[in-house]
Image (cartoon, rainbow, N blue to C red):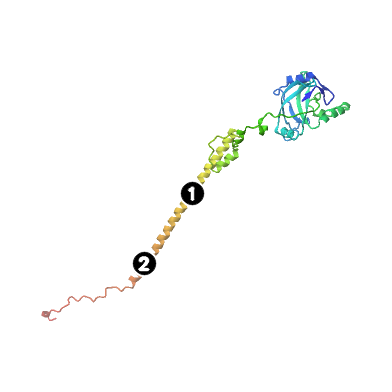
Amino acid sequence: MMTEGDTSDGRKIERNWIEQMARNYDAARYGARIWLEHMRGMHPDSSFRAYGDVVALKAEQVEDGRLALFAQLDPTPDLIEINKRRQKIYTSAEVDNNFARSGEAYLVGLAVTDSPASLGTEMLQFAAVAGANPLAARKQSADNLFTAAQPITLEFEDDAMNPKDNNADDKNKPADKTLLSKISDLLAGKKDDPAPEAITLGEDAEAAFTALATAHAEQAAQVKTFAAAREADAATIKSLGDKVETLSAALTEVSKAFDAFKSQMDATPEGNGRSPANGGGTADPDLGL
């Protein structure tokens, strides 16, 4: 990240500064963040937002005998993507050589840049004749210094960043279902797989949404049952209606037959058509009849 040598404002990085930074750095005490061109944006969606953190520092002697400072970084996905595109591949450190009035140096920030010359040789020549350091406005403290930009290569230790190195068995595993797919399955009435699935969201959130989807599915089932019952009732009503129509037709026929019989009875004369009785059919000779 830096070695003993010149900085962008003409001062030199002392060997003991590197030793002090490596020895004193504690991210829990004061963590150095990674910035774009030493610019600290105020908004999280700004191009000049933080792009990660410095996790740890160590000092090692390099081939030319100078002491160098190495850093372990925790970059954001944005910085990883930028680095993959070969952008902002140089770093420049911001050093406070009297951190918290301790009299010792401390790393307070790290910048990524594309122009090592602008923070190195050319900027160094410009700053040497300028009345004021042109980078002063970007410093946390006026006494801080920026080191000459050094090229870096980000090495990612997380296996997830290297899909080619993943175990072949993992590739054959089915992908974990998302919360959306689980809810969709429930709404569609699909059964859960017997194998347990990895939880991809917080357990509380997923449990809540799953319960909501389950309740919705149960209500949908009840609606289907009610609709089926309505259809059965409609069939019963239709059957009864058909029977009523049949009975009505039969009643009509009976009514017609009754009317015909009544008309016939009304047309028949009263009495039976026989002569009235006269008390006997033969005269008595003794009575002179």
> Does residue 195 appear left or right of residue 97 in this picture?
left
Locate residue 169: give its quadrant. top right
Q: Residue furthest right?
A: 129
Dot 1 or dot 2: first in sequence order is: 1
- Mark 1 vs mark 2: in front: 1
- Residue closest to the eye, 53 or 275: 53
Residue 21's disc number: none
Could you give the CA–CA distance between mark 1 and mark 2, rounded to whole angstroms?
44 Å
Percent of width and height locating residue 152: 76, 29
Locate residue 272: give its quadrant. bottom left
Residue count near mark 1 (Cα–Cα under 10 Å), binned few <14, some 14–19, many ≥20: few
Q: Which residue is label 2 attached to?
A: 257
Vertical side of 256 occupied by 76: above or below: above
Percent of width and height locating residue 3: 79, 23
Vertical side of 269 occupied by 143: above or below: above
Residue 228's disc number: 1
Vertical side of 143 occupied by 270: above or below: below
**Quadrant where the N terminus is found in the figure:** top right
> Does residue 132 appear left or right of residue 197 in this picture?
right
Q: Name the residue rendered at 38%, 67% in the picture.
A: 256
Task: Identify residue type, mark 1.
Answer: Ala
- Which secondary structure lies at badge 2? helix
Q: Is residue 39 visible?
A: no
Percent of width and height locating residue 18: 77, 20
Mark 1–mark 2 CB contact (< 8 Å): no
Locate residue 35: give its quadrant. top right
Q: Is residue 245 visible?
A: yes
- Which secondary structure lies at badge 1? helix
Vertical side of 15 occupied by 233: above or below: below
